Amino acid sequence: MTKKELYQKACMLPLLPGVYIIRDKTDTIIYIGKAKRLRTRVSQYFREGVPHDNKVTQMIAHAFSFDVIVCQSEFEALVLEASQIKAHTPKYNILLKDDKGYSYIRVTKEEWPRLSFVLQKEEDGAEYIGPYTSSFAARELAETAMDFFLLPRCGKRFPQDIGKTRPCLNAHIGKCMGVCSGKVKPEAYREAVKSAVRLIKYGKKDIVKSLTEQMETAAERLDFETAALLRDQIAAINKVSAGQKVVVDPDVEMDVVALAGTPRSVCAAVLRFRDGRLTDKREFVFHDTADIAAVREEFLPRYYLDDEQIPRVIAVDELPAAAEALQQALEQKRGTKVQLYVPQRGDVRKLVEMAYTNAVERLARESGRYGREEKLLDELAQVLGLKKAPKTIESYDISNWGDGSSVCGMVVFRDGKPYKPGYRRFKMQTVYGTDDYASLAETLSRRAAEYEQRTRSGAGLDNYFAEKPDLILLDGGKGQVSAVKQALQNTLFVDVPLYGMVKNDHHRTRAIIDSHGREIAINMTRGTFTFITSIQDEVHRFANAYRKQQMKKKSYASTLTEVPGVGPATAKALLAHFKSVGAVRAASVEELQAVQGIGPAMAKTIYLHFNPVDTGE
């Protein structure tokens, strides 16, 4: 359906609450939303002249049809929307990923075990406690346990480094037991690590009482070094516990949520308070949108109605549009009353401001992360005379070898960084011999044809080939650019800016050639020069790596074709089955016969070629 037809259909919807489901040409659900009045909400997507942010604009561009489910109330619509989003995970609904992944606390298995916070679980024989969905919580647990039991954080190896150097500053200020001094017994150290693990797994309830009993027992048997170590651990626990200030009522479970935005992103920060203390912090960044109100309305039910634990109190910077329905849904899931409110003054209001500050700082870090790349892209656009900075850049390079065969490597840079999912490799299908011009023309023709096929059929839109680049860079000069320009003349890529990257005698980038054959000097613009050089180096590396891989396969195949009766097709089948010539050489006659197309006689011939019978002559 066209946008006009979708608008006409939307205008026929009732002014009732419900859920709407938007699909693309392949009948895939791409967005699910709720509405207090279906006609008003859905029609605004397809009405001409209504401004939308980038995410909604992209969604509308892919919309082909929609369905609605009329509900009895806004509460019913909100609950149904949450369940449908969870079931279908549509592409344009917000995804609650705070990019932290799972975290673990690692305890090594050795004479002097070490405890640390890690982001990856490995097969190294160590004990891994977790996983924790929050790296903040896992790191805090590990740090607290090491503080309590005075465990070392340094990079020294025990027992190898014991007694070789003086104890570090942590030992002098009472934050480490000083294993490196040689005064700590292995048994006492291992007991401290066990206590730290118990603390992490079960909490600190009764831990001081247990340590006090151990200290008294050690003193009674005149083991004063162990008693002193336990005494220091008890003192450390009391000291650290005193430093953990209660910031809210210890009996209140409370989350504090605030959102901040920039012209291109929104961040939601969630602070979790349990037992009166901050126990967790999570941040979620949503790109291609600046509509904080829309993100807030979708984020809160998605966050709490999925699998998240619902606290008794949720303090927010601003209530969402459907606050009453959300509170009703939260109370239904929790089973008790939930307070969802905006604090106006006092300590909780300060905590909301703290959450907002965290959201702002996260966006600042995101902006700093992309700031350099954005500056480079703006500078590149000015140098090349482009109307806007190129978000997606594709670069191509041909690599040849001695027998005249050629391959092409295609690399993609998105937002100024390599985008590996977009990388592609091409074998020439119509070009024979060494002809870089024709090889590039064939490659770009095939690339444009793939884009046209996917966009018109609507199939495979998740594949990178369904995207259109903002800029194409070729490794080469005027001849390469001219050949590709002609090849793209009658394709949907005809309007994509096309340039060549010219190298000097030292194989380094010297200048840019535009589609009219004019040379643009870039060595006076350091940022652009460095950026273009990095693209040219990357595409050259990628194309050469593919060529070497193909040469290796070809050399393997040529080794197999030396066997009497084995042609290219049989050699290919053998390599596909055994993966290497060495495996073919080691295979038995019965294993060779398992390859499709190889009978008993051929299997025996291959076997005898690599394993000749010793006649004793």
Image (tube, rainbow, N blue to C red):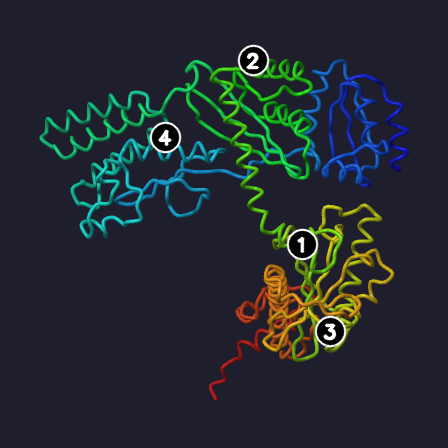
- The residue at which mark 4 appears reads as 200
Amino acid, disc 3: Asp
- The residue at which mark 2 appears reads as 339
Q: CA distance from mark 2 to mark 3?
A: 69 Å
Based on the displayed image, in which of its 4 quarters is residue 540 positioned? bottom right
Q: CA distance from mark 2 to mark 4?
A: 31 Å
Q: Residue furthest left?
A: 222
For label 3, the SS is: helix
Amino acid, disc 2: Gln
Amino acid, disc 1: Gly
Q: CA distance from mark 3 to mark 4?
A: 62 Å
Q: Is residue 43 visible?
A: yes
Q: Residue at x 60, y 59 (%)?
A: 527
Q: CA distance from mark 4 to mark 1?
A: 43 Å
Instruction: Looking at the picture, tell me which residue is in the foreground, 32 or 124.
Output: 32
Image location (x, y in percent) of residue 289: 68, 36
Please give left or right for residue 189 compared with residue 456 in the image. Answer: left
Image location (x, y in percent) of residue 333: 59, 17
Q: Which mark is residue 436?
A: 3
Count neighbours of disc 2 (C-alpha within 10 A) and say few if under 14, some if 14 to 19, many if 20 or more.
some
Count neighbours of disc 3 (C-alpha within 10 A) and say few if under 14, some if 14 to 19, many if 20 or more.
many
Based on the displayed image, in which of its 4 quarters is residue 385 positioned? bottom right
Q: Verify CB contact (< 8 Å) between mark 3 and mark 4.
A: no
Q: Residue at x 88, y 25 (%)?
A: 11
Of badges 3 and 4, nearer the viewer stands 3
Q: Which mark is residue 422?
A: 1
Please give left or right for residue 541 compared with residue 427 in the image. Answer: left
Q: Residue at x 36, y 26 (%)?
A: 202
Please give left or right for residue 493 compared with residue 463 in the image. Answer: right
The image shows residue 615, relative to residue 236, as above or below, that is below
Q: Which mark is residue 374?
A: none
Count neighbours of disc 4 (C-alpha within 10 A) and say few if under 14, some if 14 to 19, many if 20 or more.
some
